Image (cartoon, helix red, strand yellow):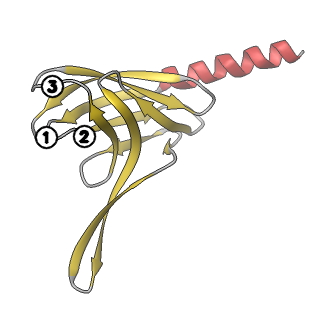
Amino acid sequence: MKKLLMATLILSGLALAQSLKLAGGWVRLVPGPNLSAYFTLYNPGPVPIKIVGASSPVAKAASLHQTMTKNSGGMDMTSMDEVKFLTVPAKSRLVLKPKSYHVMLENVTRSLKIGDKITLVLRLEGGKTLSLQLPVELR
């Protein structure tokens, strides 16, 4: 019985990862060792899916971030904070875009140019992964 339950959980996790649909992803090319990845994921399934981490072969580390702008005494103050997870709601989408959520690729290990494609691996709750191919762009 335990083996059947475990197999069901593994297969349902795999089905969840496979149900996510990528739309319009890209990596912003900027000077310096850190780059940001942006994309939209659509979840047609009946349950939310959590992204709990990321990695890429072109960076020493990758993390989930949120950029926020707050007005403080008449001045806009922008801050960027790491977040523990991002949720793709059921039957909805998660949009990662400039000045909002993004994946920070930290200490990029090789020189990239416009048109290159990088692999970004998202770790999902439950241990599954989703591999994305994103173009490097100057926007």
Horizontal and vertical percent for residue 109?
A: 26, 26
Horizontal and vertical percent for residue 18?
A: 50, 20
**Do the numbered discs 3 and 1 sit on residues whose CB atoms are within 8 Å?**
no
Mark earlier in primary sequence (3, 1): 1
Q: Mark 2 points at which residue?
A: 34
48 lies left or right of 108:
right
In the rendered image, the vertical position of residue 119 relative to residue 59, given as above or below: above
Identity of the residue drawn at 59% across and 35% down: 46
> Which image quarter: residue 116?
top left
Q: Name the residue under label 1.
A: 30
**Do the numbered discs 2 and 1 sit on residues whose CB atoms are within 8 Å?**
yes
Identity of the residue drawn at 62% across and 23% down: 13
119 lies left or right of 122:
left
Question: In the structure shown, which secondary structural element does the residue marked by tag 2 occupy?
Answer: loop
Q: Which amino acid does label 3 sit on?
A: Leu
**Do the numbered discs 3 and 2 sit on residues whose CB atoms are within 8 Å?**
no
On residue 112, the disc is 3
Count of residue discs: 3
Mark earlier in primary sequence (3, 2): 2
In the rendered image, the vertical position of residue 66 relative to residue 45, given as above or below: below
104 lies left or right of 16:
left
Mark 3 nearby-residue class (10 Å; few <14, some 14–19, many ≥20): some
Q: Which amino acid does label 2 sit on?
A: Asn
Q: Which amino acid does label 1 sit on?
A: Val
On residue 44, the disc is none
Mark 1 nearby-residue class (10 Å; few <14, some 14–19, many ≥20): some
Identity of the residue drawn at 24% across and 40% down: 34
> Which image quarter: residue 126?
top right
